[in-house]
Amino acid sequence: MTDMTAAGPLDVPGLMSRLTLEEKAALLDGSDRWYTEPIERLGIPAVMTADGPHGLRKQSQEAALHDLRQSYPATCFPPAVSLASTWDRELVHRVGEALGDECRAEQVSILLGPGVNMKRSPLCGRNFEYYSEDPFLAGELASAFVLGVQSRGVGTSLKHFAANNQETRRRYVSAEIDERTLREIYLPAFERVVKTADPWTLMCSYNKVNGVYSAENRWLLTQVLRDEWGFRGLVMSDWDAVNIREHGVAAGLDLEMPTSFGVGARRIVDAVRAGTLAEADVDLSARRVLELVNRSLPALAPGQTFDADAHHGLARETATRCAVLLKNDAGLLPLSRSGGTVAVIGELARTPRYQGAGSSQVTPTRLDDALGALRTALAGARAVTFAPGYLVESEQPDAGLVAEAVAQASAADVVVLFLGLPPSYESEGYDRAHMDLPPAQVELLEAVAAANPELVVVLANGAAVSMPWRGAARALLEGWLLGQAGGSAVVDLLLGEANPSGKLAETLPLAYSNNPTIGSFPGEHGKVRYGEGLLIGYRWYDAHELDVAYPFGHGLSYTTFEYSDASVAVQDAGQQTCVEVSLTVTNTGTRAGREIVQVYVTDPECTVFRPEQELKGFATVNLEPGQSEQVSVTLDARAFSYWNVALGAWAIEGGEFGVRIGASSRDIRAVRTIELAGTLVEPLSPELPTAMWLDHPVAGPRIRELLAGDAKYDDYRMRRLRENPFDRVARMRGFPIPEADLARLAAEANEEVRVSGR
Ligand code: BGC
């Protein structure tokens, strides 16, 4: 193998002056499915991208052409749906480091992920590749992931930018989203990663955003991403997402992937020659490709290795942190290591479902199954029996399998029933048809529960399932998809070798019909209208005061935690505002455990709609029995801001805010109230509603002063006039402020705001 790094970094300015237009255009096109274009004349090597991102999916050239499921073995870590339930930046960083090492061993320079699209609908077929319904949580964890991978000299590709929230018609649907919803829900996870982790690349989405393909959306790819957020890396297309190549270049789409077989490059050259595309735009993108090649060189060095056993161990440790203990009546779990028979029921115990299907599918280095792991762990101590109970892909119950399972359940002291979504239910490329488990599994559960109520259910699913049957289980462990070591990790949790600490990164609703996208998913006639606006996930269930099966942030432990001494220290400084939240967490149970503390912000009075509460901080703490520790969470100005459409900026509206500290979104343990001054204030003008004049921090007090003493315009009257344009109010006979003065009053107030920097 030749060492392509031997020549050292490329001289980018020098090369830019030597490249022909044709060569520059060629650089903006992939050379095959995974590689960038090399230019041998100038010693510019090709660099390799590869899927994942929860494991490396490097394919041979032949496999890439014929079978996307074929790839070289790599550690299959838990996918994003599961990583998100750890709420653990440090652990996710470590997973990222391990992935970076595996990429280097395979000379892959860019791992295509993480995906930070929001889980708008529980039915999105790719929800297992995404982190959360909450942008703050998704952004924080994806940032840790990117920092971890990139700390090893391997790049990432933050995807799919933006608003790829469904698979139905993903190649051309237009996501119709109002600006505030985009800024507050669909963009912030990308923004956070860009600003805190400097991803080497970003991948645009297939879909359109408000009518414009992401691949040609200058507002997204240049104005927001580069000019506002300061993105320094390269933008690549999703695979075959390019529509009109030269429009993409002008919009800021640097690299077309995979290869267009020269079509894209030719269009670029033709457009430059025809004067419809500026050569300067081509130069910008070519330069970014060269800079990416330079960053990628370390990964091209041959002879790098990784420790597969250590990575399997990390996959197992991670998986124990991902599972969420939803329910544990009368402490049925953990199971004792001695005693009578344990009946393991369910094919998924023997044939694990541990990742989703599509471009993220990894060939694992090995695979643990829960049945085998439990038999090994309890060998000689407890009898373990097994019945498959159902065929994984079967909808209808098999009477023989059910009867066998019931017989074994009746004869056992405790039953562990493995249920989950069949692989065909969820995949990249299509959305789920419904939120339910197959009827065969639900019927089996009912029959088994009737035979033996000492029932533990372990779930394997990449997205939320409805659980009308949950009353039949005494204990319920949501395993999501746990990667290649998930089988042994589940056993670690069942036996108490590890203490569950995962918490839900998405709401589990009572029924699909309660979810926010009813009526507007997956859209029609090429458009999907995000009619629920800001209210996705818990924001919706909270706003509508809907009961849920398990709320966002919920997760139990084998120990208990008490929160005390909650306090907030406020440094109110406009855009530099900083609120320190601190509290003491005590492990009040008898086992060591890990708690995830969540901080939600509320804005009870605001002139725009604000969700009931929004996650703005979280922290994790490990505690021995009886141990206490102080936990701190810092909230910045953004935590209190909303996107002010009129200003085109983030703004804090001055006044009272609530800081809620909780163990879940619906288990709030302490509330503190703080006051903050406003930041940006909308400019006044005479025709704006009277309310805006009265609420304005500078003009409001002056207007009230001018009205004081005139009983006709007391508070009661002015309240009724709030919605009237102020210039019309000023025209009313006898109104104490002449209309002619309004322009001056507005100018003075606006100037004062400008000078004070609010
Ligand atoms: C997916 C991307 C993936 C790419 C390459 C696309 O279909 O949307 O997430 O990275 O293929 O396989």
Image: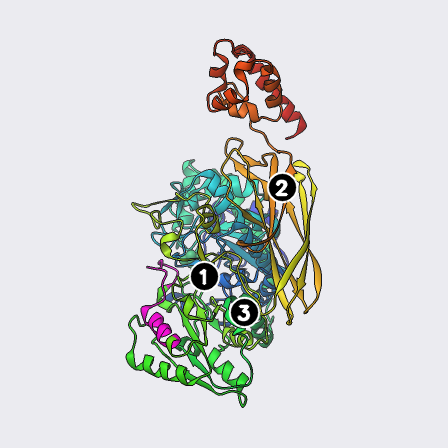
Give the CA separation, mark 3 to mark 2: 34 Å
Q: Nearer the viewer, residue 34 or 318?
A: 318
Residue at disc 1, secondary structure:
helix
The relative height of residue 537 versus residue 728 in the rendered view (above or below) is below
Q: Of the two numbered discs 1 and 3 on the same chain, state the one appearing first in sequence.
A: 1
Q: Secondary structure at mark 2?
A: helix
Q: Contact, CB < 8 Å: mark 1 with mark 3?
A: no
Type of amino acid at the residue the image marks with label 2 = Ala
The disc label shown at residue 319, or none: 3
Cα distance between the residues tagged 1 and 2: 31 Å
Of badges 1 and 2, nearer the viewer stands 2
**Secondary structure of the residue carrying numbered label 3:** helix
Q: Is residue 285 left or right of residue 582?
A: left
Instruction: Determine the residue positioned at 48% across, 78% down.
Output: 370
**Magenta region: which residues?**
426-449
Q: Earlier in the sequence, mark 1 or mark 2?
A: 1
Q: Amino acid at mark 1?
A: Phe
Q: Which residue is mark 2?
A: 637
Residue 527 disc label: none
Q: Residues within 10 Å of mark 1 (few under 14, many from 20)?
A: many
Q: Is residue 685 magenta?
A: no
* Label 2 packing within 10 angstroms: few (<14), some (14-19), many (20+): some
Task: Point out the tag, 3 or 2, that comes first from the N-terminus.
Answer: 3
Q: Position of residue 294 (x, y in %)?
A: 60, 55
- Which label number is shown at residue 128? 1
Q: Is residue 194 left or right of residue 220?
A: right
